[in-house]
Image: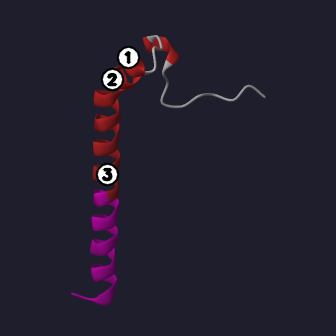
Amino acid sequence: MSNEETRKWWALGAIGVSMLTVGVDATILNVALPTVSADSNASPCGVRTRAPRDS
């Protein structure tokens, strides 16, 4: 394998690992969200993963 092909595989591997990390993170967040909502006495609509900025 040439150096260019090796770099392409490393880049593909890095992208794959980062996508896996994002997917696992989103799953953990969605599983924990009801508990966080209950512990903070917030309504389900009151807990958001990202709050939009009004500007």
Q: Which mark is residue 38?
A: 1
Which comes sooner in the sequence, label 3 or label 1?
Answer: 3
Q: Give the residue at the far left of this rendering.
A: 1
When the figure is inspected, residue 52 is found, relative to residue 10, above or below; the finding is above
Q: Residue at x 34, y 60 (%)?
A: 15
Q: Residues within 10 Å of mark 3 (few under 14, many from 20)?
A: few
Circles 3, 1 touching at the beta carbon (< 8 Å): no
Q: Which label sits in the foreground, 3 or 2?
A: 2
Q: Position of residue 40 (x, y in %)?
A: 45, 20
Position of 54 with respect to 4 (left or right) is right
Is 9 situated above or below 54?
below
Residue 4 is covered by the magenta coloring: yes
On screen, residue 32 above or below 43: below
Taken as a whole, is the magenta stretch helix, strand or loop?
helix
Q: Nearer the viewer, residue 34 or 24?
A: 34
User: What amino acid type is highlighted by mark number 2?
Assistant: Thr
Q: Residues within 10 Å of mark 2 (few under 14, many from 20)?
A: few
The answer to which of 14 and 49 lies nearer the viewer is 49
Colouring style: secondary structure
- Segment tinted magenta in the rendering: 1-17
Query: On the image, which quarter does residue 14 sit in?
Result: bottom left
What's the amino acid at mark 1? Answer: Ala
Q: Which residue is mark 2?
A: 35
Tell me the number on the disc at residue 21. Answer: 3
Alpha carbons under labels 1 and 2: distance apart: 5 Å
Contact, CB < 8 Å: mark 1 with mark 2?
A: yes
- Quarter of the image holding residue 30? top left
Q: Earlier in the sequence, mark 3 or mark 2?
A: 3
* Residue at screen point 31% across, 88% down: 3
